[in-house]
């Protein structure tokens, strides 16, 4: 996988060989875990328009509410 964006100790945006985008977010406080999921079409479109700012906003949303993204995790 190719790393497109990286905010240390918070998130990474990765692109796989097929062109799919995956967001990896560090979640938790005492027990820290990584939550990784593929961006859907809407998220990909917004990322194409807004760039890194959108990914940072999405990553904070995921870290604040990881339960909302668990069903999408890999």
Image (cartoon, grey):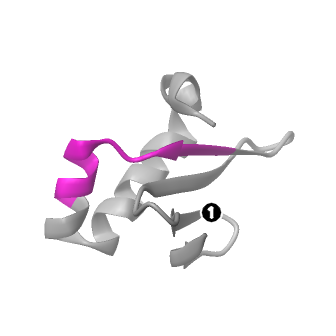
State yes or no: residue 2 in magenta.
Answer: no
Judge whether 21 appears above or below 36 on screen: below
Q: Is residue 53 left or right of residue 73?
A: left
Q: In this view, does 48 lie to the left or right of 13?
A: left
Q: In which quarter of the image is residue 44?
A: bottom left
Q: Name the residue under label 1.
A: 10
Judge whether 45 appears above or below 7 on screen: above
Between 48 and 18, the one lying in front of the other is 18
Q: What stretch is highlighted in magenta?
A: 35-46
Residue appearing at x 73%, y 41% in the figure: 28
Between 20 and 10, the one lying in front of the other is 20
Judge whether 43 appears above or below 21 on screen: above
Judge whether 52 appears above or below 47 on screen: below
Q: Quadrant of residue 63?
A: top right
Residue appearing at x 58%, y 26% in the figure: 70
Seen from this angle, which residue lies furthest right? 31
- Counting labels gives 1
How far across and how far down the image is residue 50, in percent? Answer: 19, 68
How far across and how far down the image is residue 19, in percent? Answer: 40, 63
State yes or no: residue 38 in magenta.
Answer: yes
Residue appearing at x 34%, y 73% in the figure: 52
Residue appearing at x 61%, y 69% in the figure: 1
Seen from this angle, which residue lies furthest left? 49
The C terminus lies in which quarter of the figure? top right
How far across and how far down the image is residue 7, in percent? Answer: 57, 74
SS label for mark 1? loop
Mark 1, Cα crowd under 10 Å, few <14 / some 14-19 / many 20+, is some
Q: Is residue 34 left or right of residue 58?
A: right
């Amino acid at each position: 996988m190719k790393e497109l964006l990286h905010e240390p100790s918070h998130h990474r945006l990765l692109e796989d060989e097929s062109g799919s985008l995956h967001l990896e977010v560090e979640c938790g406080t005492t027990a820290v875990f990584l939550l990784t999921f593929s961006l859907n079409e809407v998220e990909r479109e917004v990322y194409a328009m807004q760039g890194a700012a959108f990914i940072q906003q999405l990553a904070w949303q995921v870290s604040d509410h990881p339960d909302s993204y668990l069903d999408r995790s890999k």
